[in-house]
């Protein structure tokens, strides 16, 4: 939906996934970009080994 919004970042979604996996180990199930209160945010759903 907002892909390519930041022209300076060639792969912002990829960067969001890398950051999320550094904080929460597991397997990414879904990634979404939303506009919340005028700020673009990524929602990353991660399946952890503990489920």
Image (cartoon, rainbow, N blue to C red):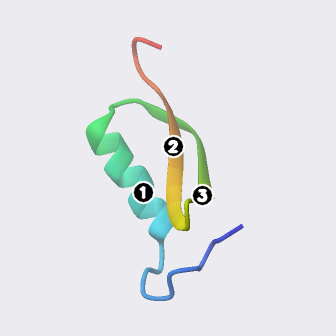
Q: Give the residue at x 43% y 51%.
A: 17
Q: Are marks 1 and 3 in contact (CB under 8 Å)?
A: no
Residue behind mark 2 = 44
Residue behind mark 3 = 33
Does label 3 or label 2 sit earlier along the sequence?
3
Binning the other alpha carbons within 10 Å of mark 1 as few (below 14), some (14 to 19) or many (20 upward) gives some
Q: Give the residue at x 59% y 79%.
A: 4
Residue behind mark 1 = 16
In the image, taking residue 43 as reference, residue 21 lies left or right, namely left
Outermost residue to the bottom: 7
Q: Are marks 1 and 2 in contact (CB under 8 Å)?
A: yes
Quadrant position of residue 34: bottom right
Q: Secondary structure at mark 2?
A: strand
Does label 1 or label 2 sit earlier along the sequence?
1
Query: In the image, which is nearer the foreground, mark 1 or mark 3?
Result: 3
Q: Secondary structure at mark 1?
A: helix
Q: Picture coordinates of residue 51 (x, y %)?
A: 47, 14
In the image, taking residue 49 as reference, residue 23 lies left or right, namely left
Binning the other alpha carbons within 10 Å of mark 3 as few (below 14), some (14 to 19) or many (20 upward) gives some
Say above or below: 44 vs 18: above
Outermost residue to the front: 37
Q: Picture coordinates of residue 32 (x, y %)?
A: 62, 51
Q: Give the residue at x 36% y 53%.
A: 18
Q: Determine the CA span between mark 1 and mark 3.
A: 10 Å
């Amino acid at each position: 939906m907002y892909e390519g919004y930041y022209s300076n970042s060639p792969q912002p979604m990829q960067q969001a996934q890398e950051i999320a996996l550094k904080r929460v180990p597991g397997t990414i199930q879904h990634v979404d970009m939303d506009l919340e209160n005028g700020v673009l945010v990524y929602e990353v759903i991660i399946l952890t080994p503990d489920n």
